Image: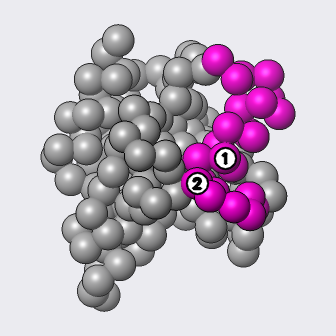
Amino acid sequence: MGNKYLFLDFDGVLHSTQDDSDFLEKLALLIPLINKYSFNIVISSSWRFQFNLNDIKNFFPLIFHDKIIGVTGDPYVGQFARYNEIKNYLFDHDKSLADWRALDDTSFEFPDNCENLILCSPNHGLQAKQIKQLEQWLEN
């Protein structure tokens, strides 16, 4: 499946946190990337605490199911929580040197100027700018 890992948040990424937008309304933007590139998806969203991996996969169209390989683990208590949860996932799966990106809307969960973060606006979620950043990463 390739050595690239996309850590995916839901709230503020796959749908806006500001209005009554449809749950995961931005998924369609990822489908062209899923069809074109080889990469793994790991769910980093806090939704992982309410739902198991199979339930989470069922939120997605079937085209996503083989790409979604896991969820990050236990919550990290401390500074840069999401970043550390991702690093712990990679370490625990012998992928410490893997090429990864995180689609997330919370910059404070990551170190300043984290090159692995593709930041979304929580008011808008995933947009063309972030898709372009993802594509540039996936092409290399």
Which residue is pictured at 20% across the width and 34% down the height? 132
- Picture quarter containing residue 118? top left
* 133 in relation to 36, above or below: below
| Circles 2 and 1: CB atoms closer than 8 Å | yes
* 135 in relation to 126, above or below: above
- Picture quarter containing residue 87? top right
Is residue 115 shown left or right of residue 94? Answer: left
User: Magenta residues, as a range?
Assistant: 75-97
Residue 24 visible in the picture: no
Q: How far apart are marks 2 and 1 (CA)?
A: 6 Å
Which residue is pictured at 52% across the width and 29% down the height? 100
Observer-nearest residue: 37 or 85?
A: 85
Q: Which residue lies most toward the top here?
A: 140
Q: Is mark 2 on a helix, strand or loop?
A: loop
Is the residue marked by circle 2 packed among few (<14), some (14-19), or many (20+) residues within 10 Å?
Answer: some
Residue 114 visible in the picture: yes
Q: Which residue lies most toward the bottom here?
A: 20
Residue 61 pos. (x, y %): 48, 53
Instruction: Say what amino acid the circle numbered 2 marks.
Output: Phe
Q: Which residue lies most toward the left here?
A: 128
Residue 77 pos. (x, y %): 74, 63
Which color scheme does this rendered protein use? one colour
Which residue is pictured at 23% across the width and 68% down the height? 124
Identify residue for label 1: 84
Observer-nearest residue: 87 or 4?
A: 87
Residue 130 pos. (x, y %): 25, 44
Identify residue for label 2: 80
Observer-nearest residue: 37 or 83?
A: 83
Is the residue marked by circle 1 packed among few (<14), some (14-19), or many (20+) residues within 10 Å?
Answer: some
Observer-nearest residue: 9 or 115?
A: 115
- Picture quarter containing residue 25? bottom left
